[in-house]
Image (cartoon, rainbow, N blue to C red):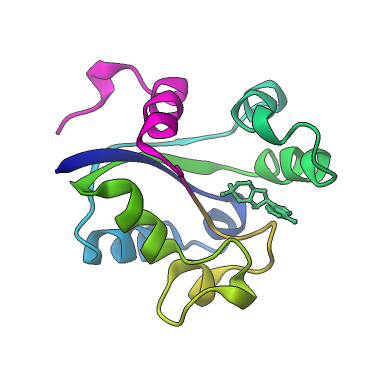
Amino acid sequence: AVTRTFSIIKPDATRRNLTGAVTKMLEEADLRVIASKRIQMTKEQAEGFYAVHAERPFFNDLVAFMTSGPVVVQVLEGEDAVLRNRKIMGATNPKEADEGTIRRTYAESIEANSAHGSDSDENAAIEIAYFFNEDEIVG
Ligand code: CMP
């Protein structure tokens, strides 16, 4: 089925002027960008977005990283969008990511890993609603 997922092009990628390059890989994986905006996340926004990781040892560093520069938040649409997006992103740790994936190609480290993608349809809906109003999404 055609579904939606939520994607973030992270600060390490925007810093290196890779917004287009990452988006091109998403599009080549047959995902359509149906909403997109470049934002500076606040500390509160990042803490809320990553609340499930609040108890993890890397949480504070993650929030600092995600607020260290602009990000591009996107809604992607396509056949099985969550799985399709996770496949083209590759594993969280770029050293474990397959050849040809976004993270293998561009990520600097497990933290500065260039892209985020929702891990389930349920979380996709929550994450999309966290950053977008329905009228900003044009399918
Ligand atoms: P993301 O998919 O955005 O979800 C949580 C993020 O935490 C992850 O990508 C990484 O950028 C970051 N992170 C940093 N250290 C770790 C770690 N040891 N394990 C998992 N995620 C990590």
First to last magenta residue range: 117-139
Q: Residue at x 52, y 75 (%)?
A: 104
In the picture, measured across the screen, residue 133 lies left or right of residue 13, that is left
Percent x, y for residue 54? 76, 31
In this view of the protein, which residue sits in the foreground, 107 or 69? 107
In this view of the protein, which residue sits in the foreground, 7 or 67? 7
In this view of the protein, which residue sits in the foreground, 125 or 76? 125
Magenta run includes residue 128: yes
Residue 131's place in the image compared with 100, above or below, is above
In the picture, measured across the screen, residue 129 lies left or right of residue 9, that is left
Residue at the farthest right position: 57
In the picture, measured across the screen, residue 34 lies left or right of residue 49, that is left
Residue 31's place in the image compared with 71, above or below, is below
Q: Residue at x 14, y 33 (%)?
A: 139
In the picture, measured across the screen, residue 66 lies left or right of residue 128, that is right
Percent x, y for residue 20? 36, 60
Q: Residue at x 46, y 44 (%)?
A: 119
Percent x, y for residue 63? 73, 38
Q: Residue at x 23, y 66 (%)?
A: 28
Percent x, y for residue 134? 26, 18
